[in-house]
Amino acid sequence: MPPLFQSYNTISLAVHAQLDSVLRLWQRRLGPDLLAVYLHGSLSLGRFQEENGDLDLLVLTARKLPREERLSLARDLLDLDQRPCPLELSALYIEDLRPWRHPAPCQFHYSGAWTDHYEKLLSGACTDSFLLDTDFPDPDIACHVRLTKERGVTLYGPYPQTFLPEIPESNFWQSISMDLYSCGILTLARVLSYQRLGRIVSKYDAALWAMDIVPERLRYLLEDAVGEKYCKKACPKPPPEDLEALRCFLTGQIEEDRGDRIPRI
């Protein structure tokens, strides 16, 4: 049985309420200095599952966020996180995108990887934080902006197609390929599908596409990865040599298409 997916128009009332709460938070904090809030990721691609998906958001502001405001936003987002979905959010100052440069500065980031850090900051257990004290260069922004511009959902502000900058192909490629040697097979399939098809698709669609090109004896690995992620299927642990063979095949195809070696990060 194929997995059931949701798009923005079919998500549950609970997810809508969570998104509304996040939007109201930014409107309350920034007022007219909030320029735009966009959805990207699986929800914008119509491949969202509430039980295992997260909400990817991109926020554009007309002014810089001071340290105290960043910490206050983190406190409020901790209260909204996991209710019901994990949040991943990056806030950008619009002038940092004009002109575009890579890696673009990110002035505020929130995700599950940093919740413990924010909780320690709020409790006073630590005081220093590059997330609060500086605008840090984030190579992922090129991917986020490109995906939002092409497939994003507008929660607030102008259409991303006309508001966001064009991302050079070389910058987008650097953004999606910088960790190829440590990422999973679904991500590798997605990168290869983009390279061959010239468009951004979900990991699910990329895996289905890749099944037609991987060696037949390794196809079951993609089938199991899709089954585990999207269908809650319990699959036996594959032999490490099979996983490595599939990774080598996919990265080899990517390198061959690019005509050069992917830099190891």
Image: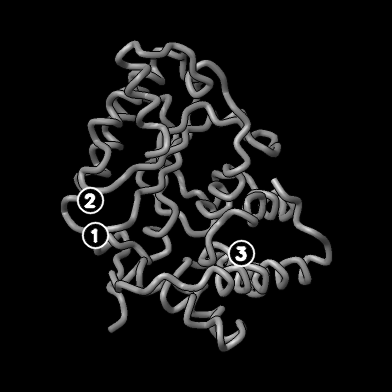
* Cα–Cα span, label 1 and label 3: 27 Å
* Cα–Cα span, label 3 and label 2: 28 Å
Binning the other alpha carbons within 10 Å of mark 3 as few (below 14), some (14 to 19) or many (20 upward) gives many
Amino acid of disc 1: Ile
- Residue at the far bottom: name it: 216
Q: Residue at x 36, y 13 (%)?
A: 125
The residue under label 1 is: 11
Q: Quick one: quadrant of the N terminus? A: bottom left
Binning the other alpha carbons within 10 Å of mark 2 as few (below 14), some (14 to 19) or many (20 upward) gives some
Nearest the viewer among 127 and 142 is 127
Amino acid of disc 2: Val
Task: Give x and y (percent) for residue 258.
Answer: 78, 65
Q: Tag 1, which secondary structure?
A: loop
Name the image quarter holding residue 4: bottom left
Q: Tag 3, which secondary structure?
A: helix
Binning the other alpha carbons within 10 Å of mark 1 as few (below 14), some (14 to 19) or many (20 upward) gives some
User: What kind of colouring is applied to the model shown?
Assistant: one colour
Q: Which mark identifies residue 15?
A: 2
Taking 42 as reference, is 251 left or right?
right
Nearest the viewer among 250 and 155 is 250
Nearest the viewer among 148 and 236 is 236
Q: Is residue 56 above or below residue 76?
A: below
Task: Give x and y (percent) for residue 80.
Answer: 24, 36
The residue under label 3 is: 191
In front: mark 3 or mark 2? 3
| Pointers 3 and 2 in contact (C-beta within 8 Å) | no
Amino acid of disc 3: Val
| Pointers 1 and 3 in contact (C-beta within 8 Å) | no
